[in-house]
Amino acid sequence: LERGHYVLALTHWVSSSSGHKASESTSQKALVELENGQLWEYQKQSGASGSLEPVQGGMMEALLEPCPWIVGLEQPSQLPQDEEGGVEDHPSPEQIVIGMSWSKRLYCGDVLLADSITSFYVSDRFLCYATTATTTTATAAVTPMAKGAASGASQLKFIALSQLFALDPFMGASEENTEVIAAEYEPRNVERGSRIVSVL
C-alpha cells in the first residue's frame, strides 16, 4: 500500500447464494477498499501470515467513488458457451462488488445503478435497494417501471444477481449494460426515507 492511504471498508467475499450473510462465508479471502476507492484482496496463508494484492480486471476496477458500504460477491467459475459451443469472448465475471457511496449512489463495479438511495441489501438472489423521492436510475431510459421514482415516490427495487453477473465488464455504463439491468422486477412504493433492515 502507498503511504498515507487508509482502509475505508473491509468485508469477506460471500457466495452469491448466501448474499449479505458474510458469516456463512468459508472463503479465506477478504475484500479491502481504500479511501480512494481502490480495491485490494487479502488472502490468508499458513499460520498468521497473509498477502495483500491489488484487485484488477473486469468489474473489479476501483469504484468510481469511495463506498463505505460494500458487498463482495463471488460465483462458481463458469465459462459460458456461444451458439457454436465455443467459449464466449467475455464470460461473466466470477466476482463483483456492490457499493453505496457517501453521496448515496449505488454501484456495481463502475456501473451506476441508482443515484439516490437510502440503503441496500443483497439476498440470496436479489440486490434490493430503497430509493429516495429524487432518485433516477440507470434503467430510467429503457423501462417505464423505473420512472416512478423520478415522479416523487420512494421505492423498493429489485435486481436479480444473475443480471449483475451478466454485466459486460468491458462496456462500463453502456447502453448494453443498461439493457441488462433494465429487466428488473416491479418496484414497490415505500414511505419516504425508508431503509432496508433485513431481507428474509
Image: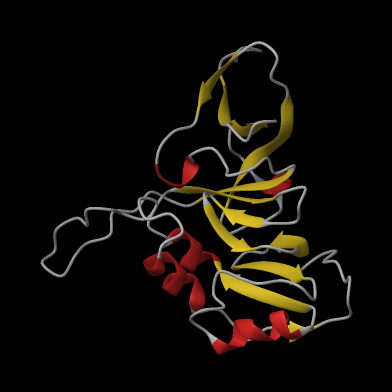
**Vertical order, 31 against 80 (above or below):** above
- Specify whether 55 is left or right of 150: left
Which residue corresponds to the image point at 61% horizontal and 81% vertical from the top-left?
Answer: 146
Which residue corresponds to the image point at 65% horizontal and 72% vertical from the top-left?
Answer: 136
x, y percent for residue 191: 89, 80
Which residue corresponds to the image point at 65% horizontal and 31% vertical from the top-left?
Answer: 36
Closer to the camera, 29 or 66?
A: 66
**Vertical order, 87 against 13 (above or below):** below
Rendered image quadrant of residue 1: top right
x, y percent for residue 53: 51, 22
Rendered image quadrant of residue 68: top right
Identify the image's colour scheme: rainbow, by chain, secondary structure or one colour: secondary structure
Closer to the camera, 79 or 159?
A: 159
- Specify whether 67 is left or right of 164: right
x, y percent for residue 121: 72, 61
**Vertical order, 2 against 180 (above or below):** above
